[in-house]
Every structure is written in structure tokens, then in C-alpha cells.
Amino acid sequence: AELEDRLRRALERGEIQVAYQPLFDAQAGRVVGVEALAQWVPITGRVSPEIFIPIAERSGLIDQLGMQVLKTAIEQAQKWKTLALSVNVSPIQLRNPNFPADVIRLLDKTGFDPHRLTLEITEGVLMSNPDQARRAIEALRNIGVKFALDDFGCGYASIGALRTFGFDRMKIDRSLVSGLKNREGSEVLTATISLAHALNIPVTAEGVETPEQMAALKQTGCDQLQGFLLGRPMSGADIAALVRSSA
Ligand code: G
Ligand code: G
Ligand code: MN
Ligand code: NA
């Protein structure tokens, strides 16, 4: 509860920051977008999102946190003109009946092009309350917002979910990418990418850490690459510099 109180105060003071990890077109090698990642760095030392996101989810703070991250990221992305923006959305947020209207209001107020925005969700949300999730996804897709199925291959994400919910992108979990080192792992990865492409869904590979992984992913026709090899989460200013240097 101590951490929860501190998180509540940090949110009130606007102390949750956002880092941006670049997303690269696999063939052209250019930066085509960023993933926004929430960061909390109190003077006592950085707290990992793997700690504070679950706290926010349990304590009812996730709606506020999620909208703060989205607003910060949109305002930042407006300075970049064309880069696509991906933002993570918690299953709890998607279950909130106000979520679609809140996002639409923010897009209206900022004038941000909905087509530049992708919301990343994990399959958990589709299991627990599929009808509510479907309504929220439909309402936002109607105005042009895209949806990515995050962490594919680590849990029980199904082919069914990919089709039924009409995802615009699949993000392959980094555990599948690290499995590339053996033959079985690389066949699973190739099959996963073929599956997405058979459904006309482009694929982003996460957790690309080595040149060998990058080469193998390009070879299999993976569309986008993300990972420490290509770029760590960084400030908005550093993204602008990276775009200038990679243009
Ligand atoms: O930044 P890092 O890789 O440590 O993030 C760890 C986890 O926290 C990832 O699963 C990521 O999706 C999640 N995460 C990061 N930022 C946000 C956010 O703004 N909202 C939600 N719901 N999850 C986030
Ligand atoms: O669950 P999600 O895909 O949103 O997680 C994003 C998290 O993955 C971020 O915390 C980010 O720091 C982390 N991440 C991004 N690239 C890499 C990578 O190449 N290796 C590892 N280990 N983590 C990564
Ligand atoms: Mn993500
Ligand atoms: Na992911």
C-alpha cells in the first residue's frame, strides 16, 4: 500500500514519464514509429513498470495512468509529424465503458490523426470480457485507430483472437525471438509469421538483440523490428535525432 500511495501522488503531480522505443521497417531499416513506455523514476530510484503497472491495475489507478501516458505520448508524437505511435493499454482500461469515448475526446482535442495511433493489447483482455473488448475495439477502429496483439506466442494468444477481433498487427513476443537460436525455435517463428501473413496481418518482432536474429527475421519476411540491438527506450528528443540520422 505504501507504493500505491506513492504512485497515486506521482500521478497527481504528473511525475510518470514516457520513454519511446523506435520501431524499424525491417527491409528499409528506417524508423517508422515508436512504442511509448511508462516510466516512473522517483528520487529513491527507478521503479519498473512490471512493478507499478500491476499496482495501478489493482488499485484503480490504471485508467488515470493510461490516459496520462496516452496524452503525453500524443503531444510528443505531434512534434514528429509522421511517425506512428503505439501505446500499451491494460485489459482493465479496455473494460472501462468510458475508455473509447475518453480516447476519442483526447484525439479530438489534440487534433492527432487517429490513423497514426496503434493501441497494443494482450490477449488476456479478450478472454475475460470479450464482448466489452470487442465493442471498445470496434468503436475506436471505426475512427481509424489500429490495434496490435501484443506479446504473441508467450501465452495462449490464439489464431481465433487474431481473426475475430480484427487486429491490424501482431507483435511477436521476445521469447519467440530468443528461441531463434535452435532449429525448432526458428521453425516456430517462421510458421508464426506465415500465419499472420496468411491473415494479411503485418508482424513486428520484439526483443531483437543480435545481428543474427535481425538477419533471420528479415529473411522470414517480418515487417517491423524492435529491440535493444536497434534502439532502446529513449527520450523524445533522442527519437528526433535518430530519425534525422537514419533518414
Ligand atoms: O518498459 P518495460 O519493458 O520494462 O515494460 C514492462 C511491461 O510494462 C511491458 O509488458 C509493457 O507492455 C508494460 N507497459 C509499459 N508501459 C505501459 C503503459 O503505459 N501501460 C500499460 N498498460 N503497460 C505498460
Ligand atoms: O510487453 P511489451 O512488449 O509492451 O514490453 C515492452 C518491454 O520490452 C519494454 O519494457 C522494453 O524495455 C522491453 N524491451 C524492448 N526491447 C527489448 C529487447 O531487445 N530485449 C529485452 N530483454 N527487452 C526489451
Ligand atoms: Mn507493448
Ligand atoms: Na510485447
Image (tube, grey):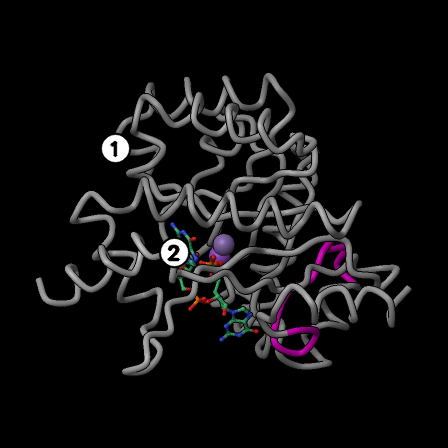
Location of residue 182 in the rendering, given as x and y in whole percent from the top left corner: 57, 77
Write down the residue under mark 2: 14
The region drawn magenta spans 219-231
Number of numbered discs on residues: 2
Viewer-closest of 101 and 185: 101
Q: Residue furthest right?
A: 247
Where is residue 162 drawn, in percent x and y?
Answer: 52, 34
Residue 179 is one of the magenta-drawn residues: no
Q: Which mark is residue 24?
A: none
Q: Is residue 174 above or below residue 119?
A: below
Mark 2, Cα crowd under 10 Å, few <14 / some 14-19 / many 20+, is few
Instruction: Determine whether the residue tagged by mark 2 lies in a helix, strand or loop.
Output: loop
63 displayed left or right of 78:
left
Residue positioned 16% across, 48% down in the render: 59
Most prominent secondary structure in the magenta stretch? loop
Q: Is residue 225 magenta?
A: yes
Amino acid type of the residue tagged 2 in the rendering: Gly
**Residue 57 appears left or right of 242:** left
Quarter-of-image position of residue 45: bottom left
Ligand 1 quadrant in view: bottom left
Residue at the spot x=53%, y=23% of the render?
A: 140
Q: Quadrant of residue 177?
A: bottom right
Amino acid on which the number 1 mark rests in the picture: Ser
| Closer mark to the observer between disc 2 and disc 1 | 2
Q: CA distance from mark 2 to mark 1?
A: 31 Å
Where is 140 relative to 238, above or below?
above
Q: Around disc 1, counting alpha carbons within 10 Å, would you say few (fewer than 14), some (14 to 19), or many (20 or more)? A: few
**Occupied quadrant, residue 117:** top right
Identity of the residue drawn at 67% across and 63% down: 22
Q: Which residue is mark 1?
A: 128
Residue depicted at 34% across the width and 23% down the height: 98
Residue 84 screen position, x and y as percent: 70, 46
